[in-house]
Image (cartoon, rainbow, N blue to C red):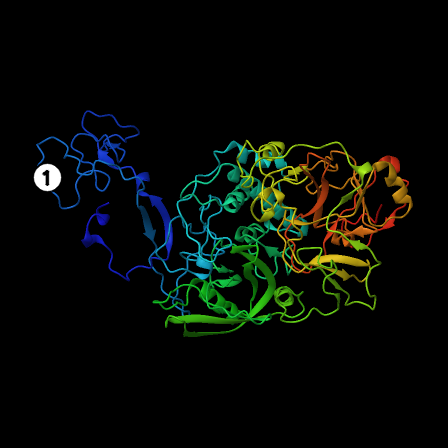
Amino acid sequence: MEQFQGQDSTPPSGSIDKSRVLEIRPLRCLVPIFPSQPNSTSFNTPQGAAPFVCSSPSGPFPPGAAPFYPFFGAPPGHNPQTPPGQTPPFRFNTPVSDAVPITSFRAPSPPRAGATSYHHSTAANGGTTPSKRVTRKSAKPQTQDGAAGEAGYVNFSMPVSDTEDTGNEKGSRTRSRKKGSTDPEVDNILTSLNIVKFDQARQNDGDRDSIEYVLLIFDLIRRKIAQIEDSKGSSPGVIKRPDLKAGTISMTNNIRTNATKRIGSVPGVEVGDIFFFRFELCLVGLHAPSMGGIDYLKVNLEEEPVAVSIVSSGGYEDDVEDGNVLIYSGQGGNLNIDQKLEKGNLSLKKSLDRGKEVRVIRGMKDVASPAGKVYVYDGLYNVEESWVEKGKGGCNVFKFKLLRLRGQPEAFTTWKLTQQWKDGIIPRIGVILPDLTSGAESLPVSLVNDVDSEKGPEYFTYVSSIKYSKEANSADSSSGCACAGGCLPGNQNCYCIQKNGGYLPYIANGVVANTGKLIYECGPSCLCPPNCKNRASQGGLKVRLEVFKTKDKGWGLRSWDPIRGGAYICEYAGEAFVYSKVEALHNDMDDYLFDATRSCPPILPSDPNEAPKMPFPLAISAKNIGNVARFMNHSCSPNVIWQPVLRTNNKESDLHVVFLAIRHIPPMTELTYDYGMVPPEKMGRRKKLCLCGSSKCRGFFH
């Protein structure tokens, strides 16, 4: 212990390599050992050996043994006058709350012949030792995407900070929460979802089903935690991060896949996939650092690590204008310090030298959440060139030119193209009508055909909502809430919150916390304003849609905007009919009939195979009047689900069918839902050939 108690014992600067951390142990774990007194008893002491006794750093101490600094006692060099035979008085009589860790260092090994003299711990990316964990604000330079320290790595066997960056550019880390949750509602989330546990093989190497399942579970957990936290209100200085809590729960319970780090493509992850949270990249094995911009892997002990993936999201001076070329700025340094060719920067240089491809994830601003990001997996790139140039602050910055491999599906270029359409920079090719709705919707809906010469679908009248006839109305009226300023989460006096089981059904960005159950929205009987959070499906479309001609399924529907999992897309508009007339509509071969009695396969394997509970039978025909929902095609592996919503109305029933995203949907991806199966007693009804092309295709639908 003496080597830590004086300036003379401090190793000279530069004599050791402090980047090679062997082990970190809190000082409070070390128990001082003192020679025992002649009359004392010690255990397991060999005969003839000097007996010893152990004492806690906080005492009590055996006679003649002084408390040791810095926990108790005087600082080095202080020599208080102490009566003979008594313990020196305590000079610092308050225990240190968080002991400073003692870090042991490995002496630098001599460089190999012809090798660059940079030293790397095997605990860096891809090593066999657990990754270095950052739990406090670091004074080290910020790295790409605001990472602090080596590469922003987090040991996911432990909880992560509540302020870690997932969508924002700059993140900071505060003291981590203890493992586990003290909230019984949060603890019951996994039980309520009845999670299917992966075996070790699927945890290490995934497939498409594994990827979709892991992301869906993470998002359901996140949405439920957000709903619970919203109901408890906000506290000063507390930053709510349901994404981090959901990620910690997922990691702790091994709800992850592709844990094996690899160079190249990740099984089950497709080029063009989008992510709204950095933790999602970690859970599917696409990019391990929760904050760092460069992920790297040490292939063997004899070579320096190579980069496996990078995230470019505007934190540094990256050039992202070209969809197939990326000029990526290195990590580390700041306006006053040059970057160094080490860690992530060195790994990119080694990828260049060895011709190893690198996964590229591009981050763009989320228009629905200005402080957030949307991350797009843009496929594999080769590092073509590297150099050093002066940055904006006048210090040296490493630059890497990456070129996208040919033959991959379009991803970032499609994203840029849709943004240019929306901004009016370039026209959308194949547009028949710029606005199919003729102003009936809050956003225009383009009618597009770039496949053949057909000029549009058969004529219909566009309406934005369901139309009830008197005979279709059902006596299910109710009084509304009195929340004049809008319904607030946690307000148990709100009638609509009471109807929803004590929670507001929607969280941020109008995302539904729980799907499947009947949602009670505010309606004409409520006093809340139109922008109330409990009116998420009202007010028109929230994303820019287009009706387009498919190659083999007629007309379809897709979005120019990315869509979050659980977000509202549109409702099914048309004429509501009493159920006695539904069979006649089926016999009339109404291809635009929505029948709420059909059952759909569950989203999760643990879900009950039944349709959502409806307050009364409902059928909607969009043959003559309808909206964009009439163009949504069937799929046996859909990305959209329908949800019943009842809006409070003291005069008549106000039941609606709305469509929500099952998972995150990239721009220009066709929107589909499962039309469902008819009840057994109606199985003789005419079947229609299914052309969804899914690996789970049933071959037909009704």
**Image point (30%, 45%), residue name:** 100
Residue 468, position as x, y percentages in the image: 78, 42
* Quadrant in which the N terminus appears: top left
Q: Is residue 653 left or right of residue 493?
A: right
Residue 226, position as x, y percentages in the image: 54, 42
Q: Which amino acid type corresponds to the residue marked 1 in the rendered image? A: Pro
Which residue is identified by label 1?
A: 80
Disc 1 is placed on an element classified as loop
**Image point (74%, 47%), residue name:** 572
- Rendered view: 596 above or below 367: above
204 and 78: which is toward the camera: 78
Residue 596, position as x, y percentages in the image: 78, 40
- Rendered view: 407 above or below 623: below
Q: Is residue 195 visible?
A: yes
* Quadrant in which the C terminus appears: top right
Q: Is residue 581 left or right of residue 243?
A: right
The quadrant holding residue 608 is: top right
- Rendered view: 434 above or below 232: below
Q: How many marks?
A: 1
Q: Is residue 203 visible?
A: no
- Rendered view: 185 above or below 541: above
565 and 209: which is toward the camera: 565
